[in-house]
Amino acid sequence: MKHLRSRLLWIAVLAVGSVLSLFPRNVSQRLYDPATGVWQDTTLRRVPIELGLDLRGGTHIALEVDQTRGPVADCGDAIRRAERVVRARVEELGTTERVVRVEGDCRLVVEIPGANDPARVRAIVQRAAFLEFRITDSREEFRSAIPGIDAALRRAGVTGLTGTGGSDPVARLLAPDSSFVPADSTASLSSLLLPGRIPGEFLVAEPQVAVAENLLAGAESLHAVPRGIELVWSTQSIGSGAEKYRALYAMDATPIVTGENLQEAEAGLDPLTHSPEVRFELNNRGGRRFADATGRNVGNYLAILLDGRMQGDPAVIQEQIRSSGRIRMGGNSLEDANDLALVLRAGALPVPLEVVAQQTIGPSLGHDSIQDGVRASVLAVAFVILVLGFYYKFAGALAIAALGMYMLLSAGGLAALGFALSLPGLAGFALSIGMAVDANVLIFERIREELAAGRSPGRAVHAGFKNAMSAIVDSNVTTALTALVLYKIGTGPVQGFAVTLLVGLAASMLSAVFVTRTFFLVWLRVRPALRTIPMRTLGFLSRAKVDFLAIRRWALGSSAALIVPGLVWLVVQGVTYSIEFTGGTMVHVQTADGVGADRIRSAMQMAGLDGAEIQRFGSDREYVIRARLDGTTMEDGSTEAVTAAVDAALERELGAGSYQLGRSGGVGPKVSSELQQKALIAIAVSFATTLIYLAFRFEWRFGLAAVLATAHDILATVAFIRYVNLEVSLVVVAAMLTVLGYSLNDTIVIFDRVRDNLRHRAKRGFAEILNVSINETLPRTVLTGGTTIATALVLSFLAGTVIKPFALVMSFGIVVGTFSSIFVAPPILYWIFQRATKTRYVEHTLEGKLGLGDVNA
């Protein structure tokens, strides 16, 4: 009784701990309000299990070091330093529960829930924000050097050039291309550069800007420019009509102060002109340097550069400036001033970053997905409860109570890990409910066998748990290995599914092996005179004596008839891949009324998206549009451009308010290539780890048979995907890997019984032992497969269009996995042992590996 009290105490501790982890808690957080420019201490009510972006909406951006602007020796170190800057910027956006994390070695992921302006988020995250204060060329050194530069150019035979042969001035200047013709044989810097309004400023007529750039980009000009002087072009033209000029500034190459000395920056309005500006404050060191430099340059002009670009016109230094000043924003908006102040406060990026993937999800789509997922989960649980209660009677009621503990432990574990629940995670949770029944069914069927052998309820319970343990451990370990591979190799959504599966497996083991057994012990203690444990029996299952090996050729022929045409079709027509694997932009559209795909395709063609792919997504009111804009990359903002083009086209065709853009995303070619490799590696590593584990636990030929049977299931699932024309996405790959784990579960349960029967029925032939083992595990196979298939089918019909591909693949995979565990894996194992050196080899192997005596193979 003391032992039983300890078990009950542990269950109570686990239950209380899980409940406490599920309670919302208050968290103090300092948030920045961009509208007022004020930091405020806010108390937030944080839920224990947060929702991922695909369930609540928001923006996801993946960035990498942009090495096209110069090689970076250690991108891992650079991305970690960039993480600190990006995190500071994101925190000032005023959003809660934002995520900034390093993924892999050299990738930075930013997730901001509720963000409805991805272009602004992208600009804030990606902006280098390198701030410099420089003095213009007050001594007119560059003006004095212009005649010498002209002379050097004449000696080299260089004249001003115009043409369309490229955008690089140096390449255009030096390349002997016939498309370049002399603009003016007498062109010289002295004739192009007109005196400006202030020292160091020159004006160039807008049509002659390219000529001046060409002349200044040559090696002759660069060598003749005075040392310590740098030339910077203005980004905006001056004047109106045909009289437009671009300003060129000569300034000190060394800045007096940079953004590293910045202490504070905030946006505001100029009290006189009411134009936006950014007021800044320097730290003590920067203030001293700024005061010293401006004090020595009173009457000269101060230029402010951000990322190498002029910010407004240089201003005259009227008096010594100590530690504060203003940056005028010209014609920009107050929001632009706010964003500039934000990135200045966070500091400059240590390296330039490029966007390699982006996704934006509307909150309404997430709300619908939550409702669908919750409804599917409730129905799945109800079905499992109904089956357990009906078939196993009071023992089933104990299992139902343990299942409630399983759900509590799963939710508590996810909350303790700070897990963000995504759509694949929601599907994994609903599916794991059906799979959680497996351990209980294995135990109950073992208990039933012990009762049939005449043992008392107490001894039957003890033997049932003991005999089922090896199959439970092996099946759960192989599934856990698959989940670990998914987590290590997969990306966000797939990792979310893997975490849910791992937590579910741990909770399932604990509830079935520990909690259910404790409930049995309590029941037996309360009912000491109990003579049997009532359970229903399906006679055709419990008394089955089917010769499965005799029909193996028919079964394998049926598999070939399914797989071969599908693979041939796959080779001929190929597979429809999602943008995760192909790169590009995807937009999910929901329309108020049913429209045809042809109408949407026509609208895309009129918008210039001729190659757009239109795919119906569930009903005739939901479509996925995949498109690319020629000449754009992820760096250029192609995701926003394609989404805007789709939005404009649909508004013209369907009218405003008659459609809704629910989800959009873009993936660069580098990421899509990596994801393809990861998917293949995940499957290969899963096979390898499974083979190694089964070879260690059984004998390597058992492992080889299990892996070959699982390969059969993967091929059959691939053929099914081709037959129903499903789009291959990361979620579908996750479903295939889950099929792999489930199929192994079934096979391992049968092989575990084969191993057990080889020990106790060694005088029988190997073929007979295989048949007996399959028949003895048939009730478990049917019950577990039935409940899991029912769960997957519920997900297929009720869990929404996003989860539907996952659920369809899982439904088929469970059917084919159950089939292969009976009709494929045992015949392969039988064939492998037949090919061995007959009885001698089998006797030696089984005696050494399985601890058997004399074996009649």
Image (cartoon, helix red, strand yellow):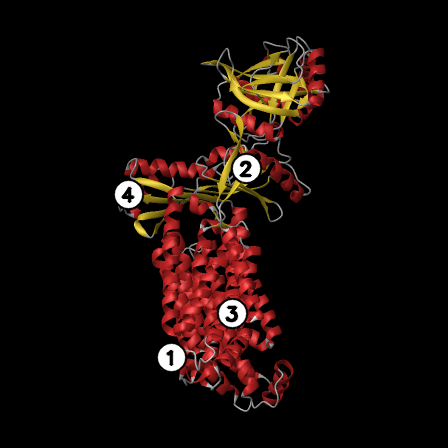
Structural distance between the alpha carbons of marks 3 and 2: 42 Å
Structural distance between the alpha carbons of marks 4 and 3: 55 Å
* Residue type indicated by callout 1: Thr
Say whether residue 559 is visible.
no
Where is residue 808 shown, x and y percent of the image?
Answer: 39, 61
Q: Which residue is mark 2?
A: 28
* Residue type indicated by callout 3: Thr
- Mark 4, Cα crowd under 10 Å, few <14 / some 14-19 / many 20+, is few
**Callout 4: SS:** loop
* Residue type indicated by callout 4: Ala
Where is residue 772 shown, x and y percent of the image?
Answer: 47, 84
Where is residue 378 shown, x and y percent of the image?
Answer: 38, 58
For discs 3 and 2, the disc positioned in front in the rendered view: 3
For discs 2 and 4, the disc positioned in front in the rendered view: 2
Structural distance between the alpha carbons of marks 2 and 1: 58 Å
For discs 2 and 1, the disc positioned in front in the rendered view: 2
Decide which of tag 4 and tag 3 comes sooner along the chain.
3
Decide which of tag 2 and tag 4 comes sooner along the chain.
2
In the figure, 753 relative to 280: above or below? below
Q: Which residue is mark 3?
A: 518
Disc ID at residue 592: 4
Say whether residue 617 is visible.
yes
**Callout 2: SS:** strand
Q: Which residue is mark 1?
A: 537
Tag 3–tag 1 contact (CB < 8 Å):
no
Q: Quadrant of the N terminus?
A: bottom right
* Residue type indicated by callout 2: Ser
**Callout 3: SS:** helix
